[in-house]
Amino acid sequence: MKMKKAASLVLVASLALTALAACGGSEEEQASNSDTFMIGGIGPTTGDAAAYGTAVQNGAQLAVDEINAAGGINGKQVEFQFEDDQSDSEKSVNAYNTLKDWGMQMLVGTVTSNPCTAVVKETYEDNMFQLTPSATAVESIQYDNAFRMCFSDPSQGTASADYIADNNLGTKIAVIYNSSDVYSSGIYQNFATEAQARGLDVVAAEAFTADSKTDFSVQLQKAKSSGADLVFLPIYYQEASLILTQADNMGYAPKFFGCDGLDGLLGVEGFDTSLAEGVMLLTPFTANSEDEMTQTFVAAYEEAFDITPIQFAADAYDCIYAIKAAAEQADVTPDMSISDMCDAMKTAMTEITIDGLTGAGITWSADGEPSKEAKAVIISNGAYEAM
């Protein structure tokens, strides 16, 4: 019996080795059989933040198609696969594992901050290169393998206060923010610090939480009673649509200023978009900019997806071209191991400069943060216009 058992074990081991060899074996062996760059993407294409994830998926795919048509990256084609995480951290990690099984070598994502913070721990352990288009939390790129295209939460808060002060947009400022959300609270904290430094009069700072984000009558009444002529909204577009509607119902009409989370406001189902007239937001992209690069992108995007692109689509588009620039700078090829590819990419990212849709002369420091000019837009006649 023991001899039969031993023989069986040898047979099982032999079959396992044969199967491993058929699958390519180690990471290095798998990489050596690859002739295509495999780039994955993660973000919400369903759920409350679906507008963000869908835009990122579309923008990245458009860039991949263009690059492939022009000869690829270092002469190699690119495959792109995107997974829905519903802006949920656990689902985002599951999506990451799905993409690893697919053969992902680099990640564009995740789209929102909490899931990105969860996934970046996985990419760090795997030493996989990661470039998020839109996750703004500091922790979302806390390791040296991760970079971002957008501004961080602290940067958005500081830039918003500076923009309001520099352009004399308000004399008394109220803030309505989500204290249970890392994006919103992170922006608010730096906004409050910079506002004080710039001499802005913040007369009210009213919080809400994820459990109380449908009725903003108390926050709006305090803002109105304090005499605020500008309300700063470092929040997402869904809550902003409710705030604008409820402010209108109570006859309160201050200026409203937000950050990139407000991008998507004009697409909220059932929302009276006339209430968004005059809303300002800090964003590096507007679809009606007259420069040739933007107009070419918008035309191609609208033809491909039958919708006008928002900032998140432009962020993702720029991400793919940043990956191309870094890969070409480092002479990266698909047959490299994921770890070797990552080491080469993270060095190259600090050496490149790109002119993208979201900024000219974009560079990155070793901590993964981009350097580019902060810009703002205003909603006018149902569209974004550069300020």
Image: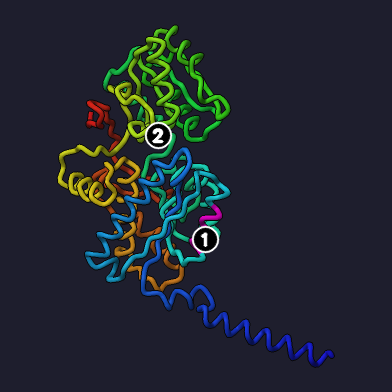
Q: Please state, as top left, top right, bottom left or bottom right, where the N terminus lies in the image.
A: bottom right
Which mark is drawn over residue 32?
none
**Residue at point 42%, 17% (across, down):** 246
Please give the residue where the numbered disc 1 appears in the rendered image.
98
Q: Using the image, determine if residue 243 lies above or below residue 264.
A: above
Q: Position of residue 86 (x, y in %)?
A: 50, 45
Q: Is residue 278 left or right of residue 259?
A: left
Q: Position of residue 341 (x, y in %)?
A: 42, 66
Helix, strand or loop under label 1: helix
Considering the numbered disc 2 on the image, is that residue within a helix, a strand or a loop? helix
Q: Image quarter for residue 346?
A: bottom left
The residue shown at (19%, 38%) is 289
Q: Amino acid at mark 1?
A: Thr
Mark 2 or 1, nearer chain start: 1
Q: Main secondary structure of the magenta part?
A: helix
> In the image, is residue 175 above or below residue 225?
below
| Residue 344 picture location, percent across and down | 39, 64
Q: Which residues are magenta?
A: 93-100
* Residue for badge 2: 261
